[in-house]
Amino acid sequence: MVLTHDRVIVFDTTLREGELVPGIRFDLPQKIEIARQLERVGVEIIEVGYPGKSEKDLSEMVQISQQIDRAILCGLARTESSEILKVVRAIKAAPRGRIHLYSNVRLPPQLHPEIVLGEIETHVRLARTYCDDVQWSAFDATRSDRQFLCRAISIAIENGATTIGIPDSLGVALPDEFSSLIQIILELVPHLDRAILSVHCHDDRHCAADNTIAALNCGARQIECTIDGLGPRKGNTDLARILRAIADRTQLKTSIRTQLLPELSAYLHQTLPQNIL
């Protein structure tokens, strides 16, 4: 993947986060068609599922991998060896794969920070032995202790993470707060230039697009979206909406063929139960 300073990578998680909406379950032919259309419109990374928790996701990822030519297929896992190995199996047939690890960085009082940092070190390193493309995401980053968050990011990068994800997991941040968080990370994390900074925003406060733009203006270069914002609670960052915002409010570019988005949206709506979206 050739990167330039003004290019934004698009990561779509419709197939995973979309199924967190009550009543939504895509069958395998639907997943294959959605993945094909995402690839056709120019999405670089397609997060297909959570094979570490779901044997169905694992089996379907193997089959979807055989239908995709260029896009990076991504599977989610906690920082646990068994889940990582299931993602490895799921993406083995893919032309290009990514292991997406996550850790909860908003720690309960009884959990010692060093335990979590040790798990990040061990499991990011393990993932890199199987795959050159490893993303580590800091679940609930916006409600975490900033010093601990930056230590966790540093350890992930030191052990081979090539993308760092900063989610507003519960959609609590406002744009100035999210921008401030990204600035703190940029100031406190050494060697951040070794990784791509990604953001994953939820729309509980109707700020997903604005938060994403704020992060891009600070230097993030990967955005995590879904088709029509499909996702739990109030939804995720809407792919078409954020592309319009990028075009209108920044000098940044994406690889998306925006003229194909209506067809993609129309197909998604065909797969959904009534009264969703």
Image (cartoon, helix red, strand yellow):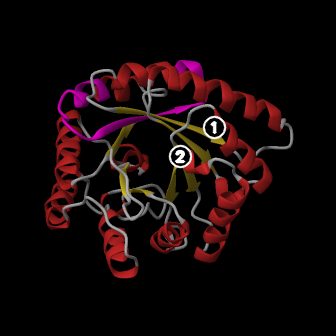
- Dot 2: within a 10 Å radius of its alpha carbon, few (fewer than 14), some, or many (20 or more) residues? some
Residue at image position (69%, 49%) is 190
Q: Quadrant of residue 265?
A: bottom left
Residue at image position (53%, 67%) is 215
Vertical position of residue 215 compared to residue 153: above or below: below
Mark 2 = which residue? Answer: 195
CA distance for labels 1 and 2: 10 Å
Give the image location of residue 151, x and y in percent: 74, 45
Q: Residue 235 magenta-drawn?
A: no
The answer to whether residue 9 is visible is yes
For the residues bearing labels 1 and 2, Cβ distance under 8 angstroms: yes
Answer with left or right where residue 199 lies relative to residue 24. Answer: right
Q: Secondary structure at mark 1?
A: helix
Q: Which residues are magenta?
A: 61-83
The answer to whether residue 173 is visible is no
* Number of numbered callouts drawn: 2
Q: Please give the label number shown on residue 156.
A: 1
Q: Tag 1: residue type?
A: Ala
Q: Residue 81 magenta-drawn?
A: yes
